[in-house]
Image: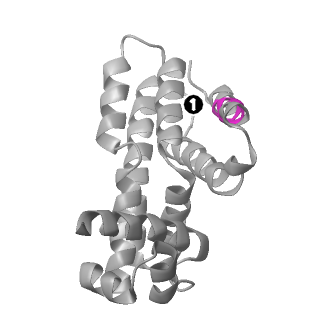
């Protein structure tokens, strides 16, 4: 029984913290939204701070793990060209990340240095993997920061997910993401 209640509280916490941030939500708000008592929140999570951190970990666990991203990339090397490989991997990462989770990660980034590290650790790993793959593909003669390019794409996709994705149908969202990735690939000095 506690696991169902805990799960419901975490789901509502992700939603509320994603919308209003850590400081914009009270345990009373959380209890009301989750249809539990404040005592249940404190019994299960000990504090609002612990609940926020647990919600953050739950949000991260619902998206594509960097290890899965790495596996997908390295499994595809040699079988696909860079363009196809990057498109498939980035698209899979993007669509694995629910909008409330993406919004919560951003809220955590601005709330606290410890939470920033937790929230953006997996995103930084995705960027690092994409950077390494691009560095293998980039021509040595051109001055080019693969890290900056990888970060630009991932952050642009995060921005889109957080601010606009819910305004589009699934088909339209896929088209926009494909266009963003396509434009990004077009601007890379990778042959």
The answer to which of 177 and 86 lies nearer the viewer is 177
Position of residue 159 measured from the top left corner of the image (x, y, whole percent): 64, 54
Magenta segment's dominant SS is helix
- The quarter holding residue 2 reads bottom left
Position of residue 82 measured from the top left corner of the image (x, y, whole percent): 49, 20
Position of residue 177 measured from the top left corner of the image (x, y, whole percent): 65, 35
Residue 122 among magenta residues:
no
- The quarter holding residue 58 reads bottom left
- The quarter holding residue 171 reads top right
Whether residue 89 is situated above or below residue 35 in the rendered picture: above
Residue 179 among magenta residues:
yes
Magenta residues span: 175-181
Q: Is residue 54 left or right of residue 147?
A: left
Circle 1 residue:
142
Q: Quadrant of the C terminus?
A: top right
Count of numbered marks: 1
The answer to which of 165 and 190 lies nearer the viewer is 165
The residue sitting at 41% across, 63% down in the picture is 119
**Considering the numbered disc 1 on the image, is that residue within a helix, a strand or a loop?**
loop
Most extreme residue toward the top is: 79
Q: Is residue 114 visible?
A: no
The answer to which of 189 and 155 lies nearer the viewer is 155
Q: Is residue 158 visible?
A: yes
The residue sitting at 39% across, 42% down in the picture is 64
Whether residue 148 is situated above or below residue 39 in the rendered picture: above
Position of residue 124 measured from the top left corner of the image (x, y, whole percent): 41, 52
The residue sitting at 60% across, 27% down in the picture is 189
């Amino acid at each position: 029984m506690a696991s169902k209640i805990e799960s419901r509280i975490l789901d509502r916490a992700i939603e509320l913290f994603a919308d209003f941030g850590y400081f914009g939500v009270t345990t009373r708000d959380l209890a009301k939204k989750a249809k539990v008592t404040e005592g249940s929140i404190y019994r299960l999570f000990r504090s609002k701070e612990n609940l926020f951190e647990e919600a953050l970990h739950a949000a991260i666990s619902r998206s594509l793990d960097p290890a899965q991203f790495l596996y997908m990339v390295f499994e595809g090397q040699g079988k696909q060209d860079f363009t196809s490989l990057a498109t498939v991997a980035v698209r899979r990462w993007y669509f694995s990340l629910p909008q409330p989770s993406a919004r919560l990660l951003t809220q955590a980034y601005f709330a606290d240095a410890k939470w920033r590290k937790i929230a953006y650790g997996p995103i930084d790993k995705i960027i690092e993997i994409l950077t390494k793959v691009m560095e293998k593909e980039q021509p040595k003669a051109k001055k080019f920061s693969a890290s900056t390019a990888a970060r630009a794409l991932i952050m642009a996709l995060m921005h889109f997910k957080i601010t606009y994705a819910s305004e589009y149908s699934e088909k339209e969202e896929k088209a926009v993401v494909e266009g963003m990735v396509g434009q990004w690939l077009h601007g890379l000095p990778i042959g």
